[in-house]
Image: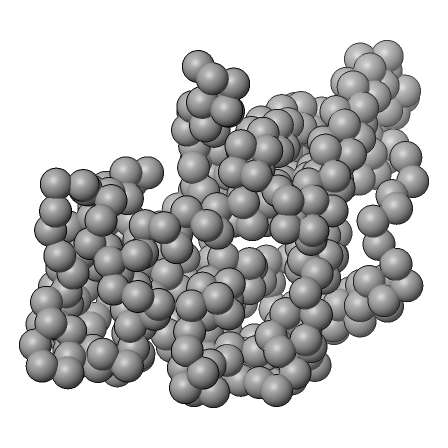
Amino acid sequence: MKRTIYGTDHEAFRDTVRSFLIREAVPRQDEWFGQGFVSKDFFAQMGGLGLIGMQVPEEFGGGGVDSYKFNAVLAEETAAQLVSVGGLRVHMDIILPYFMEYADDEQKKRWLPGIANGTLMTAIAMTEPGTGSDLAGIATTARLEGDHYVINGAKTFITGGIGADLVIVVARTSKSENRRSGLSLLVVEDGTPGFSRGRNLQKIGLKAQDTAELFFEEVRVPVENLLGSEGEAFTYLSSNLPQERLSISVNAVSQSRAALKATLEYVQDRKAFGQTVGSFQNTKFVLAGLSAQMEAAESLLDRAIEEHDRGELSVADAARVKLFATEMQGRVMDECLQLHGGYGYMLEYPIARMYADARVTRIYGGSSEIMKVIIAKSLGL
């Protein structure tokens, strides 16, 4: 089906992104997979071309656009070129909105130019060893001593944490009977005494996207690094959930498209029993069914992108999109790998990597079960 959400500016941006990725990202995939992270010079290159800070105001070195569609185009082209850009989408889609919305003028002048040009990469430290989706259970503390907060605690599963220059830490600055109260956002800068990084955690997928353990031992952060108001972090974190889940959905649909394309090419070339695998009725039926599911997911996604640009995408509708798109992605990857036969299990074929990468999308950003709870609540259940 013909898509109608993109205009000439988006397609021109797509061409620029595609050319850049083919030139700078494709040749370095083996290097990044081997080391477990994307080299920081790549982000600086990308930022220098204006591909990262499209939503940052022009006065801070960005593109000054409000639309999320440019972010979606970047995700689509990344999938189409079968490359990984590490934690870039978390930097752009999930973390930047906190700086845009809650940073004061001084903080914006200090941080936004580097965030836009790729020289200040970011991470957000929410998850802890003892807490997952239950953010109200965060145990990391930050006590106020004069003009500094002193942070103590540990975080895990932090995307981009190994190379981050700025880490937004969710910490408890006060206690109350309401577990959701008293959480604050504090920006910890690289090199701050007491802030250390643990392992780059080994995952079954997303091999070029670093996922870190972070530790905070008497880390002194100036009060000027408090993002927004003290005690309001839970509200802030909740407000960005629609874009976070939309971002995951864009990736799920884009990766599914790439998997289908790779599988179509494979089954038309691979022969078995004297004919191509693509000529078997089962292959035709499987791929036809997957194509229909992807069209449905893409239509739902495009509607959500439009609503998000208008500021109308609700938490429940974002949950619906994420649930549908990521569950569909899981089915697509499984069926496409199956059609590759034994070769689908070999890492030299893109489908093997995409299969492993896809599994986590039904977990992070809120698991499928959490999405169902949110949707059920919106139905009055």
Residue 12 can be seen in this image:
yes
Residue displayed at 46% across by 50% down: 239
Look at the picture and state if 220 lies above or below 93: below
Look at the picture and state if 355 lies above or below 273: below
Q: How many marks?
A: 0
Residue displayed at 22% across by 79% down: 223
Colour option used: one colour
Q: Is residue 52 left or right of residue 202?
A: right
Q: Quadrant of the C terminus?
A: top left
Taking depth in this image into account, of 27 and 92 the one nearest to the observer is 92
Q: Is residue 50 left or right of residue 354?
A: right
Q: Quadrant of the N terminus?
A: top right
Residue 360: x and y, percent? 47, 38
Residue 184: x and y, percent? 26, 61
Q: Is residue 56 left or right of residue 372?
A: right
* The image quarter in which residue 81 lies: bottom right
Residue 130: x and y, percent? 18, 42
Residue displayed at 51% across by 70% down: 100
Residue displayed at 45% across by 28% down: 374
Q: Is residue 201 left or right of residue 274?
A: left
Residue 368 can be seen in this image:
no
* The image quarter in which residue 196 lies: bottom left
* The image quarter in which residue 262 lies: top right
